[in-house]
Amino acid sequence: MTSFDDWVVHFEANDEHHRATEPMIDWSSPAEVQGRARGAFVRSFQRFELGESGEGAHLLDLAAAAGDPAYTEALTLLVREEQKHSALFGRALGYLGAPTLDSHWSDAAFTRLRRLLGLRTEIGLFLIAESVAMGYFVALAERAPDPVLRAVGRRIADDERDHIRFQVDRLRVGFRGTPMPLRALVGVAWGVVAAGAATVLVVDHGQALRACGVSPIEYWGRAMRSFRAAARSVLKNPEATLLGPTPLAPARAAG
Ligand SMILES: [Fe+2]
Ligand SMILES: [Fe+2]
């Protein structure tokens, strides 16, 4: 039977895994991506560098108040992974010869909004953001026109796949005992937010997606499908056993 202790074990093992795989990224090689595509990746990475840098203090306080120490510990480790993603994007910006940004209005607005919310709503937003962005990391991993950017994408996509499972698990616990009509209503509200999040993503990162050979319109549809799959696995049957982490993939070289 899966529990949040399994997630603590996963995040600890994943930290080891990062230490083994990250040195394989060849930051010292000259960037292969040039011109407009390079500018597109710079703007896109600047947003992700900021967006993933949060300390999650409010979220972790809410988790602590909910009174499951294993969950809080696992969430603390997940927030640390997000900060590592931010650092990876920062490093990728250095590799592309570009600076990080100090702040962006949309992150500040989002942070202020989230201060007003409870744990279940916050985790719901987290799941929406991650399921909508997952395809971007996969596109980067598989199709970026530069081996270092592909390695960064792989590194982050591997983490995010489990982040989505982790949020699903906590939300299943959170929605146990919530009647079906109410869950259906939550699904509708999430869908509205997901459509907005997917739109913001394709507007902000459309050029970078194109540089990976992905059409923003197609991306939008795919992002919504991946959101709906995640939402369904929470709201259809929250009594289901927890998903738990996936087994760690073997270390792979950059390429
Ligand atoms: Fe992340
Ligand atoms: Fe994540």
Image (cartoon, rainbow, N blue to C red):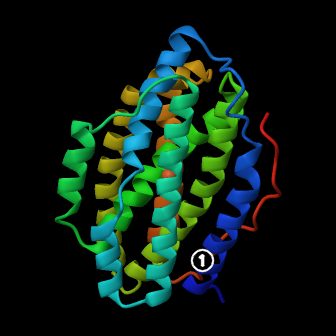
Which of the 4 quarters of the picture holds residue 28? top right
Dot 1, how many residues are within 10 Å of its Cα: few (below 14), some (14-19), or many (20+)? many
Specify the quadrant that holds the C terminus.
top right
Q: In this figure, what is the number of numbered marks? A: 1
Q: Is residue 181 visible?
A: no
Residue 220 pos. (x, y %): 46, 34
Q: Is residue 36 visible?
A: yes
Which is more toward the observer, 182 or 131?
Answer: 131
Name the residue: 52% across, 22% down: 97
Name the residue: 18% across, 56% down: 113
Q: Tell me: 201 left or right of 85.
A: left
From what the image shows, is residue 184 above or below residue 147? below
Which is more toward the observer, 237 or 230?
Answer: 230
Instruction: Identify the residue position indicated by label 1 in the image.
Output: 7
Name the residue: 37% across, 66% down: 123
| Residue at mark 1: C-beta within 8 A of ligand 2 | no
Q: Tell me: 153 left or right of 37.
A: right
Say what amino acid the circle numbered 1 marks: Trp
Residue 195 pos. (x, y %): 35, 42
Which of the 4 quarters of the picture holds residue 181? bottom left
Q: Tell me: 76 left or right of 59.
A: right
Residue 59 pos. (x, y %): 32, 70
Which is more toward the observer, 21 or 236?
Answer: 21
